[in-house]
Amino acid sequence: MIKKVIIITFLLLSITTEAQYGSRYGSQYNRRQSMQPREPRAVQQPRAPEINVEKAVGLIFYNIEKIGKKVGVKKSSDAFKEMASVFNSFNKELKQIKRINTFLFSEGKSKMEAAQKESMKNRDFNALRKANKEVTESFKPIIKVIDDKEKKLEITLKEILSEKQYKKWIKYKENLKKK
């Protein structure tokens, strides 16, 4: 008697699961409906990437507390105070460079955006390449100044930090530049 009850419940469960599976995922009767061709969606134009001129030039303002955590320098130590003063002066110098070259940055950004719009419209990317080359040439002196400032920063940090901390700093800086 118990065997018959178990067999009957097993059969009922298998039938209900088959019914649920067939209705949910399309049984052989529903497959024809799902194979009908769908209407094509409206063709979307790809969005142009946003241009960040400051990042392209290499202007990175460092957060002192975050660097202290990443590098492993405690806030109470003298090395942190020296490091903080070095980064504060470095960030001030970068802000000065940014302020002086604001017009050049905005001009370069507008030139690149106009070239992007034109190239997306005409599907010809030569105008974008040409604009990119012009903007890059105009930014070369700024990039050189920023690189010099970063080299000076590296030299002073090498004196302040231990070798292990300095390696962590280099790794952190490279990750920031990749973003």
Image (cartoon, grey):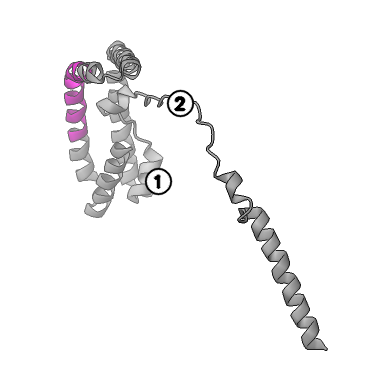
Give the magenta part as a residue range: 133-151
Residue type, mark 2 in image:
Val
Residue 122 lies in quadrant: top left
Marks 2/1: CA–CA distance: 55 Å
Question: Which residue appears at 31% of the width and 22% of the height?
Answer: 53
Q: Which residue is mark 1?
A: 75
Q: Main secondary structure of the magenta part?
A: helix
Residue 124 within the magenta-colored segment of the rendering: no
What is the three-letter code of the residue carrying label 1?
Answer: Lys
Identify whether 78 is placed above or below 142: below
- For the point 19% across and 16% down, the residue is 134
Residue neighbourhood size for the residue with mark 1, other residues' Cα within 10 Å, grouped as few (<14), some (14–19), many (≥20): few
In x, y percent, where is residue 80? 34, 44
Residue 64, percent across and down?
37, 38
Q: Considering depth in this image, is 168 or 11 the residue closer to the camera? A: 11
Residue 92 visible in rendering: no
Residue 165 vertical placement versus 3 (above, below): above
> Nearer the viewer's eye, disc 2 or disc 1?
2
The kind of secondary structure element at disc 2 is loop
Q: Residue at x 17, y 29 (%)?
A: 148
